[in-house]
Image: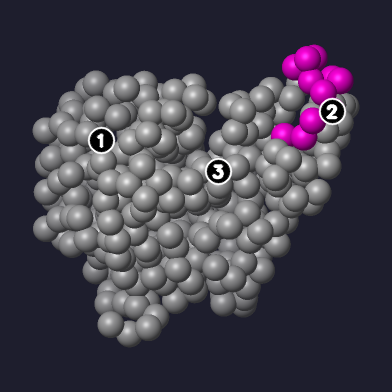
């Protein structure tokens, strides 16, 4: 193995949870890992230097949005997103598959062509084929590239889910061909099948035949209950190769992450830390705190006395309450930073407890704590 080749090392397991390490040309990633979402080349409201300081080892970008803005020509000039946004560590990019669902009013699917979008910005026609998605992600210079898939909305219609599996499998094959033999990057397949075990098994079987560097569970975190999500993960995650990383897309709350880790998932991403930060919701070791609540108006304690990033341990809940109620942008910046810091500290504790063999007790303590 060359030094810069992508690889994954499974270090140990404890009560179903996996401790591992991903190696990329831009750095190592300890797993289980959480990836802050930088859809358009920025983790909203947080400076890049501060993201480093939280212990973040990888962030997520988005193919569809970066294709629209700033566009591939600008990204080419900068030799990728890392230089453009001044982020020196690994990047994973969503292929645009999620936007096929979330922006369904602006696109149509042609299984032979790809997704045909009407830009939500200016109405311009955008064709995102499997090949185009891979090309854009390579221009972004992503370390982990996702196949283009069809991610259906939450449904119990098996015919619709089977159709999404068939198209996604066909597109995954085309993505694999377009990706080629670049060992410095990774190509992940994405399983579909909703909440049906037999359909998930079919989707996984299809992807294993194509052979990817890692595998993602797609089509979850789309409105199902946490219990339903955990059940389908319990029934199917073990079918994925043990020697490759497993990624649960778009998840989630600390409890979601903890439960999924116990079922063998290695990687997570979610907008929740920054989206919650913009609405005054903070994640702490005391649980979730709604800073807008009047009971914090005279609370002189910080969110986390141990977090010195941007002097967060010197800002009182009272001050943050004032900022959020005054609609000051500093409120969302400080709370978002706190949330990303907390998420990364939470992941560190998960990894520490897996390594020490105490994951079961950590799980029991926190699985319902943030619900």
Which residue is depicted at the point 56% across and 47% down?
A: 345
Task: Pick out the residue farthest to the top.
Answer: 294
Q: Is residue 299 magenta?
A: yes
**11 sits to left or right of 81:** left
Q: Position of residue 320 (x, y in %)?
A: 81, 31
* Residue in the foreground of this view, choosing between 42 and 96: 42
Of circles 3 and 2, the one toward us is 2
Task: Quote the CA–CA distance across marks 1 and 3.
Answer: 22 Å
Q: Mark 2 — residue?
A: 300
Q: Is residue 16 above or below residue 86?
A: above
Of circles 2 and 1, the one toward us is 2
**256 sits to left or right of 17:** right
Question: Label for residue 233?
Answer: 1
User: Helix, strand or loop at disc 3?
Assistant: helix
Is residue 253 something that shows in the picture?
yes
Q: Position of residue 176 (x, y in %)?
A: 25, 65
Q: Is residue 343 above or below residue 2?
A: above
Question: Label for residue 62?
Answer: none
Is residue 102 something that shows in the picture?
no
Q: Main secondary structure of the magenta part?
A: loop
How many numbered dots are placed on residues in this image? 3
Q: Position of residue 27 (x, y in %)?
A: 48, 71
Which residue is depicted at the point 56% across and 36% down?
A: 272
């Amino acid at each position: 193995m060359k030094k810069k080749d992508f690889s994954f090392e499974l270090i140990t397991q404890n009560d179903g949870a996996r401790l591992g390490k991903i190696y990329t040309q831009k750095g190592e990633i300890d797993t289980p890992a959480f990836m802050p979402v930088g859809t358009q080349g920025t983790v909203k409201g947080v400076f890049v230097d501060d993201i480093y300081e939280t212990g973040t080892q990888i962030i997520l970008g988005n193919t569809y949005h970066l294709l629209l803005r700033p566009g591939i020509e600008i990204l080419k000039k900068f030799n990728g997103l890392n230089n453009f946004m001044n982020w020196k560590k690994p990047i994973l990019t969503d292929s645009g598959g999620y936007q096929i669902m979330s922006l369904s009013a602006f696109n149509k699917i042609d299984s032979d062509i790809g997704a045909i979008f009407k830009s939500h910005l200016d109405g311009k026609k955008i064709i995102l084929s499997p090949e185009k998605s891979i090309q854009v992600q390579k221009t972004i210079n992503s370390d982990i590239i996702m196949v283009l898939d069809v991610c259906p909305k939450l449904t119990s219609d098996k015919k619709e889910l089977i159709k999404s599996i068939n198209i996604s499998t066909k597109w995954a094959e085309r993505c694999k061909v377009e990706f080629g033999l670049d060992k410095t990057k990774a190509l992940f397949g994405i399983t579909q099948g909703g909440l049906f075990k037999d359909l998930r098994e079919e989707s996984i079987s299809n992807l294993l035949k194509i052979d990817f560097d890692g595998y993602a569970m797609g089509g979850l975190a789309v409105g199902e209950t946490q219990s339903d999500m955990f059940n389908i993960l319990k029934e199917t995650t073990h079918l994925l190769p043990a020697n490759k990383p497993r990624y649960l897309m778009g998840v989630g709350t600390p409890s979601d992450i903890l439960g999924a880790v116990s079922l063998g998932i290695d990687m997570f991403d979610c907008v929740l830390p920054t989206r919650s930060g913009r609405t005054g919701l903070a994640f702490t070791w005391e649980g979730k705190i709604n800073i807008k609540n009047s009971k914090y108006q005279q609370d002189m304690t910080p969110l986390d006395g141990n977090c010195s990033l941007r002097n967060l341990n010197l800002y009182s809940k009272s001050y943050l309450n004032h900022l959020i109620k005054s609609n000051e942008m500093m409120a969302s910046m400080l709370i978002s930073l706190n949330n990303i810091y907390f998420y990364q500290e939470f992941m560190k504790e998960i990894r520490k407890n897996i390594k020490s063999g105490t994951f079961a007790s950590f799980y029991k303590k926190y699985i319902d704590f943030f619900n």
